[in-house]
Image (cartoon, rainbow, N blue to C red):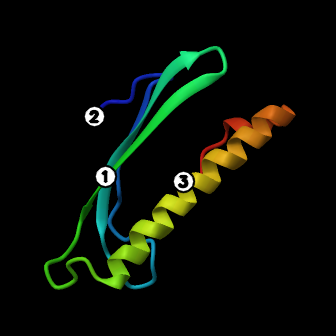
Amino acid sequence: MAPIKNQRISWVSEPGSTSMQGVEIANRGQIRFVRKGAQAVNITLTISYEVPDVLLLTPVVEGVISTDMERFRDFAVNKEKLKAEGAPEAVASP
């Protein structure tokens, strides 16, 4: 999954990175951007989690997924606000 400038960002989590203290759940994913006009873009977020068999879909795993989605939403919303204000921070990564 190579990145495509202005179209796709992809990642694989690094060992030791967790969304919740003490829970190691590896993930990988991509964000795709498809322009739909001068002021519109479709954004598709895909995340795959490697959940240990002992956890299955427990409240802990659901919490990790929920936290990741909230972090992405907050990042995207804040970036858009900074961009609209012309702030140089709008080009920094999370």
Position of 58 with respect to 8 (left or right) is left
Position of 48 with respect to 37 (left or right) is left
Q: Which mark is residue 1?
A: 2
In the picture as drawn, the residue positioned furthest to the left comes out as 53
How far apart are the two marked residues, 1 and 2, measured between alpha carbons? 10 Å
Q: Which residue is mark 3?
A: 72
Q: Nearer the viewer, mark 1 or mark 3?
A: 3
Residue 94 seen by the camera: yes
| Horizontal and vertical percent position of residue 17 | 41, 68
Looking at the picture, which amino acid does disc 3 mark?
A: Phe
Is residue 61 depicted above or below 79 in this figure? below
Q: Secondary structure at mark 2?
A: loop
How far apart are the two marked residues, 1 and 3, measured between alpha carbons? 14 Å
Q: Badge 1: how crowded within 10 Å, few (<14), some, or many (20+)?
A: some
| Horizontal and vertical percent position of residue 53 | 13, 79
Q: Residue at x 84, y 31 (%)?
A: 86
Is residue 52 depicted above or below 1 in this figure? below
**Contact flag, marks 1 and 2 (Cβ < 8 Å):** yes
| Horizontal and vertical percent position of residue 87 | 83, 37
Looking at the picture, which amino acid does disc 2 mark?
A: Met
In the picture as drawn, the residue positioned furthest to the top comes out as 38
Q: Residue at x 56, y 60 (%)?
A: 71
Q: Badge 3: how crowded within 10 Å, few (<14), some, or many (20+)?
A: few
Is residue 33 depicted above or below 11 in this figure? above
Q: Badge 2: how crowded within 10 Å, few (<14), some, or many (20+)?
A: few
Looking at the picture, which amino acid does disc 1 mark?
A: Arg
Q: Which residue is mark 1?
A: 28
> Quick one: label 1 or label 3, which is nearer the N terminus?
1
Q: Secondary structure at mark 3?
A: helix
Position of 75 with respect to 61 (left or right) is right
Is residue 66 depicted above or below 27 in this figure? below
